[in-house]
Image: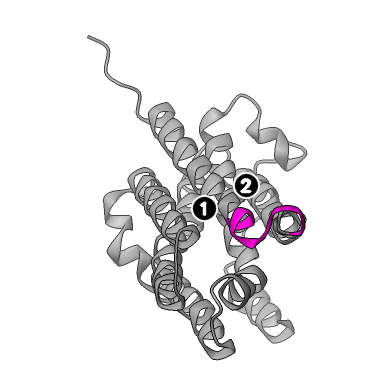
């Protein structure tokens, strides 16, 4: 990280301080009166909520609820992680050609289907397939969201910071929230929270798209 930071500091084009919009103050202020940005922030929050919960609870789910072998449980999570990696490597070519807003809708809808398949999985193989599918669709959510926000000429720099701040809270609240539910109800009901998060992503994507592209008046 230190080497990467030094290289960025050396190589990245210098931008004069006055080029940045300093009027917004605290970054989160930019979300006020901007339903489209709030919708994008919710999408990133839910996407990171799901992604941040996978590294622990996915393996435990396969091991305890499905009775899978430790290698099978690890492979199921590896499928999710590999899909996230591959999806983000090729996101720009595969989905971004559809536009950021449509990409977010597709990502959210696919995540809903994949999370439902995961919660209802009856075998390690089925769970691994659901993880693979979930990782693929989830992989493009955050890149498309940040791309959409960064393209905003009004407050792109500050808006990215605000959406990032909201989104990364999903990494913080995801694992303990699922642990709290799993402690009281079990792992399968806890993973049902992923379905709820994916549905929230889909609703936010549809609302955000409607705000950005309102229907033409007759």
Residue 23 showing in the rendered view: no
In the figure, 7 relative to 46: above or below? below
* Image mark for residue 163: 2
The 10 Å Cα crowd at callout 1, few under 14, some 14 to 19, many 20 or more, is many
Q: Is residue 184 magenta?
A: yes
Instruction: Label 2, secondary structure: give it.
Output: helix
Q: Main secondary structure of the magenta part?
A: helix
Q: Residue at x 49, y 50 (%)?
A: 145
The span picked out in magenta is 183-191
- Which quadrant is the C terminus positioned in? top left
Using the image as rendered, state which of residue 1 and residue 76 is in the foreground: 76
Which residue is situated farthest in the top direction here? 218
Using the image as rendered, state which of residue 152 and residue 208 is in the foreground: 208
- Which quadrant is the N terminus positioned in? bottom right
> Marks 2/1: CA distance?
8 Å
* Image mark for residue 146: 1
Counting from the top left corner in percent of width and height, residue 191 is at: 59, 57
Counting from the top left corner in percent of width and height, residue 113 is at: 38, 53
Look at the image and name its color scheme: one colour
Residue 214 sits in quarter: top left
């Amino acid at each position: 990280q230190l080497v990467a930071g030094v290289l960025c500091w050396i190589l990245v084009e210098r931008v004069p301080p006055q080029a940045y919009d300093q009027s917004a103050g605290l970054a989160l202020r930019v979300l006020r009166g901007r339903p489209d940005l709030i919708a994008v922030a919710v999408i990133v929050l839910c996407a990171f909520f799901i992604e941040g919960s996978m590294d622990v609870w996915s393996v435990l789910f396969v091991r305890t609820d499905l009775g899978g072998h430790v290698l099978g449980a690890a492979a199921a999570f590896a499928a999710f992680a590999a899909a996230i990696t591959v999806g983000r490597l090729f996101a720009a070519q595969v989905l971004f050609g559809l536009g950021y807003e449509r990409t977010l809708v597709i990502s959210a809808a696919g995540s809903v289907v994949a999370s439902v398949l995961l919660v209802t999985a009856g075998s390690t193989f089925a769970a691994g397939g659901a993880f693979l599918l979930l990782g693929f669709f989830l992989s493009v959510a955050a890149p498309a969201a940040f791309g959409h926000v960064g393209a905003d000429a009004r407050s792109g720099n500050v808006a990215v910071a605000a959406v990032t701040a909201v989104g990364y809270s999903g990494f913080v609240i995801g694992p303990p929230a699922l642990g709290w539910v799993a402690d009281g109800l079990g792992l399968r009901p806890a993973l049902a929270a992923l379905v709820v998060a994916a549905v929230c992503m889909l609703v936010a994507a549809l609302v955000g798209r409607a705000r950005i592209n309102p229907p033409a008046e007759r």
